[in-house]
Amino acid sequence: MRQPIDILKNIFGYTSFRPGQEEIISNILSGRDALGIMPTGAGKSLCYQIPAVLTDGTSIIISPLISLMKDQVDALRQNGVQAASINSSMEWDDVVSIFRLVSSGRIKLLYIAPERFENNGFREFFHSIEIGLVIVDEAHCVSQWGHDFRPSYLNIAPAIKSLKRRPVVAAFTATATPEVRDDIIRQLGLESPFSVTTGFDRENLFFQVEHPADKTKFLLDYVSKIPNASGIVYCSTRKQVESVCDKICRTGISAVRYHAGLDDDERLRNQEAFIYDKAGVMVATNAFGMGINKSNVRYVIHYNMPANMDSYYQEAGRAGRDGLPADCILLFGPKDVMTARFFISQCEDSGTKKSAYRKLRDMVDYCHTTGCLRSYILNYFGEEDAPGNCGSCGSCTSQTELVDVTTEAKKIISCVYRMAEHTGGRKFGSAVLTDVLRGSQKARIKSLGFDKISTWGLMKEYRVDDVRGIVDFLVAQGFLQTEAGEFPFLSFTENSLPFLKSRTKLLMRKQEEKAEKRPLQKNRHTETVNEELFDVLRSLRKELSAAEGVPPYIVFSDKTLAAMCDMLPSDKDGLLEVPGVGQAKLEKYGDAFIYAINSWRGDTARRH
Ligand code: ADP
Ligand code: MG
């Protein structure tokens, strides 16, 4: 019998399994239900594709989005695996012809949307075929607790129950919260599933927070340093999307836009242009990204701070699915906090509102922490053994000076104390606090009598943003807190008084005035790779993919191209050694890539 490792090598062209994959595969093959909770890009698909190839009959894969199904089917076919999908955009005739292929045993993996189970014709068909496995991808959609609840996912369990012989059922998701996990097991009726949860870290992602005085300049500098790379820029409003997209286009780099205000046609066209590498940069609101599996996204820049860490990690996580280094950069500006607060204040339900404000505070803290950003993220998602110093985030690699802000911090905290004292315990936000510290003569300040308190004007010589920056920093460090309400009133924490009395020094990363002072992240994957050859192979890939009608990353991932540049295979045997090159792709594309590599080698030899 063929073994999973043979399938991994011959069909998918990879040499070894990633964490969790082998265990899940062998459990499914031994007849046990399974639940895989692994982050984006961890390789969940292979966990069920390999068992599906090795199991008799047709395996049914339930997936929530047409684009995801299409992507997977394209990728499987490229690797010579018989796969198809049935979705709502198809004519009934086409559906029937797929039924026919399945019935004659010519489809190993059939991707369907959960709504299919509501259709009589499909249900009949479902009962008439030999089913291998039933796989539920993006299984968090079955849970009300998740962010993408899909009622039709509730059809899955009854459909499985109605079968004469119950197949093995396996479910996969990247959402790790216990409520969602329990829901998946219950709602899908998994029977004592073998369950694997791998860590949430994405090692190849470099996290960075910038506080640029001029965001546009920072962005354009960054983007134009790696003009050939594919990237996503997220903005919080449609207007911002339009203006940022225009600015990038004006530098000569092709960017496209995506937001809910555009008509379907343009959205689809722009999305395709991005996926097919015709446009390098996608500028979008958070409406973009669900169901996008493009693996060669080299950076995700947030032009505005998102409303919470959950959204941030999900959006930033769209970078580097192929496992190559990718950057996740957040451009923080004080206005972003106001925008986020405004959106939350529009919300009706007070419970939701409160938790939204709390989540916003965690997000703002991320933007101000001087600690390891990766650890902050992992802690947020409940991983207790985060490293503390990852060595590959903006904080851990920062060369920026740390400045001693002990005196300023004490002035600020004392001022919060004096203001409360003077008004019988009232609390104020950082705008009023900053006014008092800078000795403002505003009527409101005077009417509150704050021009009489001892801390008035203590920080006269500081700029508003500098004071605010230190206040935010103190909140991030837990020396002050803001209430989780519409108005972020400042108050003490249990650390405030001890700090005022202590002699400990407080160091804060220096705020940059100009973006260009800071060294930009390089496109790090090209450090080890020959960039010239990489570009040659990238164009070849694009040409071949256009002829095949699939996105370039489906032909070969960036990682596979990079490996070709490192290994410089000169014949088919050599090419087969490259990760990501399996038998089917070797036959299809082998000659073209070997020819390209060999002629590039010949050219460079002649030049030297
Ligand atoms: P997920 O569904 O978990 O987000 P995917 O299944 O889409 O992730 O896999 C992400 C990428 O990792 C794909 O390009 C896939 O081919 C690759 N991959 C998966 N398993 C392996 C492996 N064992 N070795 C090398 N690459 C792998
Ligand atoms: Mg997936």
Image: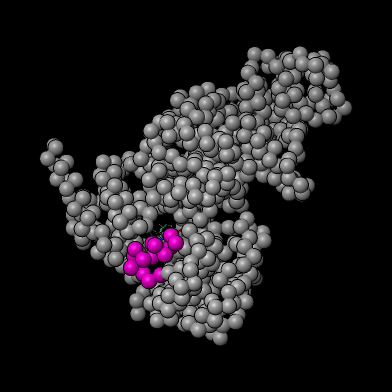
Asked if one can make out residue 476 in the rendered structure from this viewpoint, the answer is no
Whether 91 is among the magenta residues is: no
Write the residue at 54% across / 58% down. Answer: 174
Quadrant location, the N terminus: bottom left
Tell whether 90 sits left or right of 594: right
Quadrant in which residue 459 is drawn: top right
Whether 79 is among the magenta residues is: yes
Write the residue at 29% across / 62% down. Answer: 585
Whole-percent x, y for residue 319 in the image: 46, 47
Give, as a single range, the part of the protein colored magenta: 70-83
Whole-percent x, y for residue 541 in the image: 30, 52
Q: Is residue 124 above or below residue 309?
A: below
Quadrant location, the C terminus: top left
Write the residue at 63% across / 60% down. Answer: 149
Q: Is residue 64 above or below residue 322?
A: below
Whole-percent x, y for residue 278 in the image: 38, 45
- Quarter of the displayed picture in which ligand 1 can be seen: bottom left
